[in-house]
């Protein structure tokens, strides 16, 4: 009795709970009867069930509002993950592009002939024609100053020249095209001195180059590096073309003919630099 006297509030709450439990039990028994008492009992049970079930749902995590909030948070996290994946792909692509552009930039240091040219980076978007990759399209055009006969390079050397262009595109004819004449030079040792021999080459129809040295005393050896000579007015001097794979004198003109393997791997060509 003393405890009850000291804890009147708790006693009152306990009594109310007990009364509600008894009333709920009686109401549950009577709610199925089609009487005034049964209908009143059903209303009371429904009234009590709603807050109780709501509380249980919150505890078990089945609350619709909590579920909606959880789904919203899950959707947000998924969106963040997808965004991070996209940023990672962009970062990786940027890193690859930077390496390629650095390689292209280094190729410009071979001489001063291109010092007054503006380099425009472009992606190869389509190849046209046969497997020799003699003609392809890049995604830079007249809006960047790209026009006919502007020179196209990559980090490995000369790619070719622009054949035609428009807004956002340019068709490039590669150095391996049979109709693309290119002046070249090869450096040799003669009597202990460096001697430059000039020649002209074009595509051999099979992805390589074939050329003839202009000087009847011209000479080249397998493994020699071939670079542009600057003759012809299109290609600046000193840009790498390839290496000699075969060298022999022709009986007809008594001039040395050379076969050249381009240093550019056209089947894997993705990014180029156009000099405008």
Image (cartoon, rainbow, N blue to C red):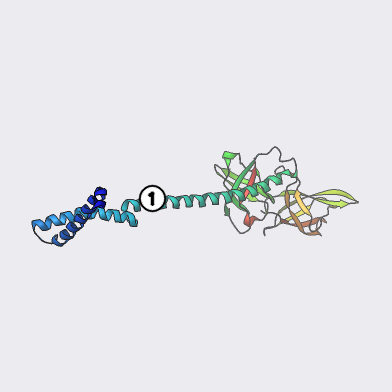
Drawn side of residue 17 relative to residue 58, left or right: left
Label 1: which secondary element: helix
Depth order, front residue of 116/16: 16
Q: Is residue 90 above or below residue 250?
A: above
- On the image, which quarter does residue 110 sit in? top right
Q: Quadrant of the C terminus?
A: top right
Depth order, front residue of 117/77: 77
Pinpoint residue 149: horizontal percent, then vertical percent.
Answer: 65, 43
* Residue 149 visible: no
Pinpoint residue 58: horizontal percent, then vertical percent.
Answer: 32, 54
- On the image, which quarter does residue 166 sit in? top right
* Residue 194 visible: yes
The structure residue drawn at horizontal position 26% and vertical position 48%, both measured from the top left corner, is 6
- On the image, which quarter does residue 46 sit in? bottom left
Q: Is residue 147 above or below residue 51?
A: above
User: Which residue is the site of mark 1?
Assistant: 72
């Amino acid at each position: 009795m003393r405890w009850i006297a000291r804890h009147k509030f708790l006693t009152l709450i306990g009594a109310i709970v007990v009364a509600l439990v008894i009333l709920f039990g009686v109401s549950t028994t009577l709610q199925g009867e089609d009487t005034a008492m049964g209908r009143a009992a059903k209303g009371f049970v429904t009234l009590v069930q709603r807050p109780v079930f709501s509380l249980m749902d919150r505890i078990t995590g089945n609350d619709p509002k909590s579920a909606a909030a959880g789904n919203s948070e899950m959707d947000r996290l998924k969106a963040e993950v997808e965004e991070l994946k996209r940023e990672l792909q962009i970062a990786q692509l940027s890193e690859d592009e930077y390496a390629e552009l650095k390689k292209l930039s280094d190729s410009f240091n071979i001489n001063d002939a291109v010092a007054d040219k503006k380099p425009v980076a472009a992606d190869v978007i389509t190849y046209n024609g046969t497997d020799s990759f003699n003609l392809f399209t890049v995604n830079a055009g007249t809006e960047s100053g790209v026009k006919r006969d502007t020179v196209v390079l990559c980090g490995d050397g000369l790619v070719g020249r622009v054949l035609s262009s428009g807004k956002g595109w340019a068709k490039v004819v590669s150095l391996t095209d049979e109709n693309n004449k290119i002046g070249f030079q090869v450096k040799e040792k003669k009597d202990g001195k460096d001697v430059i021999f000039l020649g002209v080459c074009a595509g051999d129809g099979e992805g390589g180059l074939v050329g003839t040295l202009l000087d009847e005393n011209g000479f080249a050896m397998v493994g020699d590096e071939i670079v542009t000579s600057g003759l012809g007015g299109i290609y600046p001097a000193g840009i790498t073309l390839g290496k000699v794979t075969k060298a022999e004198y022709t009986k007809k003109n008594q001039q040395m003919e050379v076969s050249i393997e381009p240093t550019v791997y056209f089947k894997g060509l993705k990014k180029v630099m156009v000099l405008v």
